[in-house]
Image: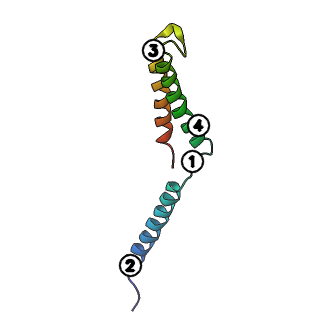
Amino acid sequence: MPKSKVRKKVKEQHHHDQVVEQAEHAHLLKESPSWLAPTMVAAFLAGLIWIVIFYVSSTSYPIPKIGAWNMLIGFGFIGAGFTLATRWH
């Protein structure tokens, strides 16, 4: 007995769904750029070193004239590191 057209359409739909799933899966396996991890680590370390220098120098360095704003700069570097970390695969 010949197959109905409904079954043929369902089979074609399943094939289309599989192609879409494979395309989505390939998109998920995309790797991070090679510069991302070193830049992320450098941003974390720069922020940490900036804050440590600020505390060790009794709030005189790295930039003497801005005072406690040095903390904001240090945390800005750390925030940039976290922002880059969200893009890492």
The residue type indicated by label 1 comes to Ser
Q: Where 36 falls versus 60 (above or below)?
A: below
> How much space separates mark 1 and mark 4, taking CA atoms?
12 Å
Number of numbered discs: 4
Q: Nearer the viewer, mark 3 or mark 1?
A: 3
- The label number, if any, that marks residue 39 in the structure image: 4
Mark 4 vs 3, N-terminal side: 4
Q: Where 36 falls versus 23 (above or below)?
A: above
Please provide percent x and percent y for residue 73: 49, 21
Which residue corresponds to mark 2? 7
Q: Nearer the viewer, mark 2 or mark 4?
A: 4
The residue type indicated by label 2 comes to Arg
> How much space separates mark 2 and mark 3, taking CA atoms?
69 Å
Q: Nearer the viewer, residue 26 or 89?
A: 89
- The label number, if any, that marks residue 42 in the structure image: none
Q: Nearer the viewer, mark 2 or mark 3?
A: 3
Q: Are marks 4 and 3 in contact (CB under 8 Å)?
A: no
Callout 1: 10 Å neighbours few (<14), some, many (20+)?
A: few
The residue type indicated by label 4 comes to Thr
> How much space separates mark 3 and mark 1, taking CA atoms?
33 Å
- The label number, if any, that marks residue 69 in the structure image: 3
Q: Are marks 2 and 3 in contact (CB under 8 Å)?
A: no
Mark 2 vs 3, N-terminal side: 2
Q: Are marks 3 and 1 in contact (CB under 8 Å)?
A: no
Q: Give the quarter of the figure containing the N terminus.
A: bottom left
